[in-house]
Amino acid sequence: RYPLEEEQATDEDAQALTSRLDQQHYEIIDTETALRQWAEKLHCEKTLAFDLFTAGLDPLTAPLVGISLCNDPGHSLYIPVGHATITEDQLELNQVQEILGPVFADPRTPKVAHNASFDLKILEQHSMPVIGLAFDTMIAAFLLNSDRRIGLKALTRELLNIVMTEITELIGTGKNQCNMSDVEIRQAGMYACQDADATLQLLRILQPQIDE
């Protein structure tokens, strides 16, 4: 388990909330045994937040780099499958398909994502179709306030008062920009776990407002 490094915020409230992030439990799953153990816990009626990381932006062609999952606020896992590494362990895609495919396809497990359309297409292309998508936090945020910024980082700052790591801190910008497959697994995993965790926490704020 690795703690998320504390980010610096711009006001006292954000600093106070951000400082709690290093108390959360984020885990990198890089063995088949560990993934099977987690799958047993995820295969249930508890809402599951998920986020995907790819080596491209076209959902029909982009290779899958990793998957982050969260069904308990503060506890997330990251499954690396496509990092360009020879020194870090990761799972084979066929192992992940075999173990997580039934979880994604189980309609008894409600799923939530941010900008789910992209993730659904990626999973479909990688033979893990999703059944039971219950909520999209990006769509919900827009429906509630069409003038707000609806990116995950912006919403997390607005609604949770937490400052998250920006993707450019991992992959850079301009001519020096790489993609997620080039990022070392531990660093990518902490970023990914943060995204799934934030999505689940946003669900708990947005869903009651949508239901009103």
Image (cartoon, rainbow, N blue to C red):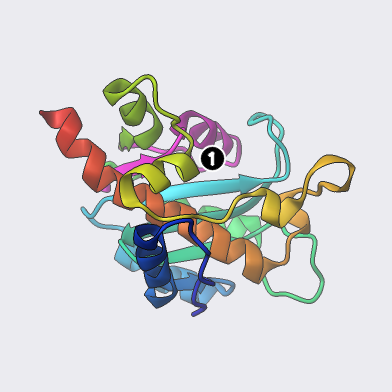
Q: 149 or 97, which lies in front?
A: 149
Indicate yes or no whether the magenta region holds residue 22: no
Q: Residue at 39% of width from left, 58% of height from top?
A: 14
| Residue 112 point in image, percent of width and height | 34, 42
| Quadrant housing residue 139 | top left
Tell me the magenta residue range.
108-132
Q: 57 or 62, which lies in front?
A: 57
Q: Residue furthest bottom?
A: 1
37 left or right of 166 in image: left
| Residue 111 point in image, percent of width and height | 33, 43
Q: In the picture shown, does residue 138 fall above or below 31?
A: above
| Residue 48 point in image, percent of width and height | 33, 51
Quadrant of the drawing holding the C terminus? top left
Q: In the picture shown, does residue 127 fall above or below 17?
A: above
Q: In the picture shown, does residue 167 fall above or below 79?
A: above
User: Which residue in the protein does label 1 denote?
Assistant: 123
Q: Residue at 63% of width from left, 56% of height from top?
A: 93
68 left or right of 25 in image: right
Q: Residue furthest right?
A: 175
Q: Residue furthest left?
A: 212
The answer to whether any part of residue 37 appears in the image is yes
Query: Circle 1 sits in a helix, a strand or a loop, which is it?
Result: helix
| Residue 154 point in image, percent of width and height | 46, 40
74 left or right of 63 in image: left
Q: In the picture shown, does residue 75 fall above or below 200?
A: below
Q: Residue at 46% of width from left, 65% of height from top?
A: 77
Q: 1 or 15, which lies in front?
A: 15
Q: Residue at 48% of width from left, 56% of height from top?
A: 10
The residue type indicated by label 1 comes to Leu
The answer to whether any part of residue 48 appears in the image is no
Q: Residues within 10 Å of mark 1 (few under 14, many from 20)?
A: many
